[in-house]
Amino acid sequence: MAIQKSGSAHWQGGLRDGQGTLSLESGALRGQSYSFAKRFGGEAGTNPEELIGAAHAACFAMAMSNELGRAGLTADSIEATSTVTLDPAQGKITQVHVEVVATVPGATPDQFAAVAETTKVNCPVSKVLAAADITMAARLG
């Protein structure tokens, strides 16, 4: 059974002087402001790349938990950070880098490395981002 979730955005004005709001179906974000300055400048606030990074990190941590379970292991904790690189000159996301630190009782470094690599390939959001160069650094904590 397919699962569908949605997000929505509204934009007004030109690219540099306009502004928008975004919302998530769940209501976790509602009317969150975003703009050119928040995306490409130093203005505080969210932007599409940050949201993609958060989605990827959340998915990656859950997918790693699943892969660890398949290996007969359970994590005490998994900390994942996904950094999304947008190259404005190319007009595309060029790289995604995942940093993962996990505390996994009983896991050997080789087991963990294998689980991390499998997770990188099989995480559903990683698959969506496969057009970008996805790199990773994973270590047991």
Image (tube, rainbow, N blue to C red):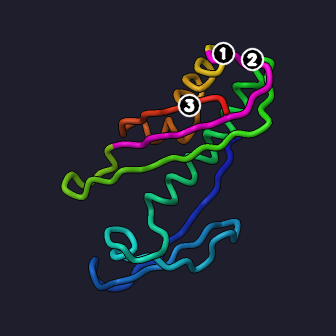
Could you tell which of marks 2 and 3 lies nearer the N-terminus?
2
Q: What amino acid is found at the position of numbered circle 3 in the picture?
A: Ala
Quadrant of the image occupied by residue 123: top right
According to the picture, the residue beneath numbered tag 3 turns out to be: 138
Residue at disc 2, secondary structure: loop
> Tag on residue 111?
1
Q: Are marks 3 and 1 in contact (CB under 8 Å)?
A: no
Residue at the spot x=75%, y=28% of the render? 104
Coordinates of residue 21 in the picture (x, y in percent) = 50, 78
Q: Are marks 1 and 2 in contact (CB under 8 Å)?
A: yes
Relative to 9, say whether 74 is above or below: above
Q: What is the spatial separation of the Cα atoms under label 1 and label 2, in whole angstroms?
A: 8 Å
| Highlighted magenta segment, given as a residue range | 95-109
Quadrant of the image occupied by residue 141: top right
According to the picture, the residue beneath numbered tag 2 turns out to be: 71
Coordinates of residue 17 in the picture (x, y in percent) = 29, 85
User: Is 42 or 33 nearer to us in this picture?
Assistant: 42
